[in-house]
Image (cartoon, rainbow, N blue to C red):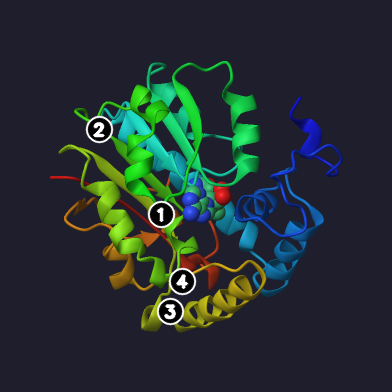
């Protein structure tokens, strides 16, 4: 029974620390989930007091993920995905999106937060095309060498590498550019990278730039992480992969479904997405 985390921390496994906020649980709060604790909600509420449409930003991220994964499965024939920093199970997980296109599509979820493992295993227990492993994105070689991952992923076939809202939780001194390169390099030609990141729009949108600065301070002070990066910095994650149209854009601008809308507030331009193909 994995409902233990829903309301209080009685009977929690010891590796789940409810005295400190966790990225996965704060994000769950923004998505309207129930797998978060008082310490996580505190940061969530603080963020909402500064950025009233922060929940829309989280939802826009999930919608972008849905469009990108569906596109890769349906239009590009991708049948195996590695979802790094996958987060807690929510509505519309990667395996559900990909398996709508092909029930045999394989997905490996990777996260370093033990709560993701606990909930992920429960959700996926019945699905033999999908698995979840606990690993750190800062160790790409260890992730690709993981025996479980290797049973699901065939490195001679194109892979969909998903980096959604994960690299902005690495600081510059952890060299996310090197990490992204080491994740891209072993993939065969025809593989794809899809990513979303906090975005510093700089002169393009001065209001958004100001908001990015404020949020970066809040996140670092209270969550210990969070980088809003410039276009140039984010393009560094793509390396020699070829950017698909419409490029690196606000999440809702990436091939939006008809009728999908989000007010073009300051927040709109603080979160961007891209999909790119390995030549
Ligand atoms: N990818 C999902 C999405 O975009 O909807 C969830 C994003 S959530 C904001 C970030 C996730 O990355 C969290 O679940 C967190 O535990 C995970 N994470 C943060 N640092 C990580 C690291 N060094 N290695 C692996 N996962 C990490």
Look at mark 4 in the image and give the residue it sits on.
228
Look at mark 2 in the image and give the residue it sits on.
76
User: Could you tell whether 46 is left or right of 137 in the image?
Assistant: right
Tell me the CA gap for discs 1 and 3. 31 Å
Look at mark 3 in the image and give the residue it sits on.
205
Verify CB contact (< 8 Å) between mark 2 and mark 3: no
Q: Residue at x 32, y 27 (%)?
A: 153
Q: Are there few (<14), some (14-19), or many (20+) residues within 10 Å of tag 3?
A: few
> Nearer the viewer's eye, disc 2 or disc 3?
2
Q: Which mark is residue 138?
A: 1
The disc, 2 or 3, on the residue closer to the chain's N-terminal end is 2
User: Secondary structure beneath disc 2?
Assistant: loop
Q: Is mark 2 within 8 Å of ligand 1?
A: no
Tell me the CA gap for discs 4 and 2. 30 Å
Tell me the CA gap for discs 2 and 1. 28 Å
Q: What is the x, y in percent for residue 77? A: 26, 27
Q: Residue at x 32, y 26 (%)?
A: 79
The disc, 2 or 1, on the residue closer to the chain's N-terminal end is 2
Tell me the CA gap for discs 2 and 3. 33 Å
> Considering depth in this image, is 10 or 201 the residue closer to the camera?
10
> Nearer the viewer's eye, disc 3 or disc 4?
4
Q: Are there few (<14), some (14-19), or many (20+) residues within 10 Å of tag 1?
A: some
Quadrant where the N terminus sits is top right
Verify CB contact (< 8 Å) between mark 1 and mark 3: no
The disc, 3 or 4, on the residue closer to the chain's N-terminal end is 3
Tell me the CA gap for discs 1 and 4. 19 Å
Verify CB contact (< 8 Å) between mark 1 and mark 4: no
Q: Which mark is residue 175?
A: none
Q: What is the x, y in percent for residue 50? A: 68, 74
């Amino acid at each position: 029974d994995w409902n233990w985390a829903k309301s209080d921390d009685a009977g929690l496994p010891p590796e789940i620390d409810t005295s400190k906020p966790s990225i996965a649980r704060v994000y769950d709060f923004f998505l309207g989930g129930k797998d978060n604790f008082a310490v996580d909600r505190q940061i969530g509420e603080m963020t909402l007091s500064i950025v009233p449409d922060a929940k829309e930003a989280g939802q826009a991220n999930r919608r972008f993920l849905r469009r990108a994964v569906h596109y890769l499965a349906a239009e590009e024939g991708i049948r195996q995905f590695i979802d790094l920093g996958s987060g807690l199970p929510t509505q519309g997980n990667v395996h559900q999106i990909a398996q709508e296109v092909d029930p045999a599509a394989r997905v490996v979820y990777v996260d370093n937060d033990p709560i993701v493992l606990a909930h992920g295993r429960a959700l996926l227990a019945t699905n033999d095309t999908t698995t979840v492993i606990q690993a750190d994105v800062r160790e790409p070689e260890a992730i690709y060498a993981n025996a479980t991952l290797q049973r699901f992923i065939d490195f001679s076939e194109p892979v969909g590498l998903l980096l959604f809202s994960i690299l902005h939780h690495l600081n510059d001194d952890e060299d996310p550019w090197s990490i992204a390169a080491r994740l891209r390099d072993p993939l065969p030609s025809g593989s794809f990278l899809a990513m979303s990141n906090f975005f510093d729009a700089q002169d393009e949108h001065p209001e958004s730039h100001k908001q990015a600065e404020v949020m970066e301070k809040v996140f670092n002070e209270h969550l210990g992480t969070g980088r809003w990066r410039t276009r140039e910095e984010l393009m560094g994650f793509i390396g020699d992969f070829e950017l698909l149209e419409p490029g690196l854009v606000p999440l809702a601008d990436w091939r939006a479904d008809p009728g999908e809308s989000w007010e073009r507030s300051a927040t709109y331009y603080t979160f961007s997405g891209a999909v790119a193909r390995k030549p």
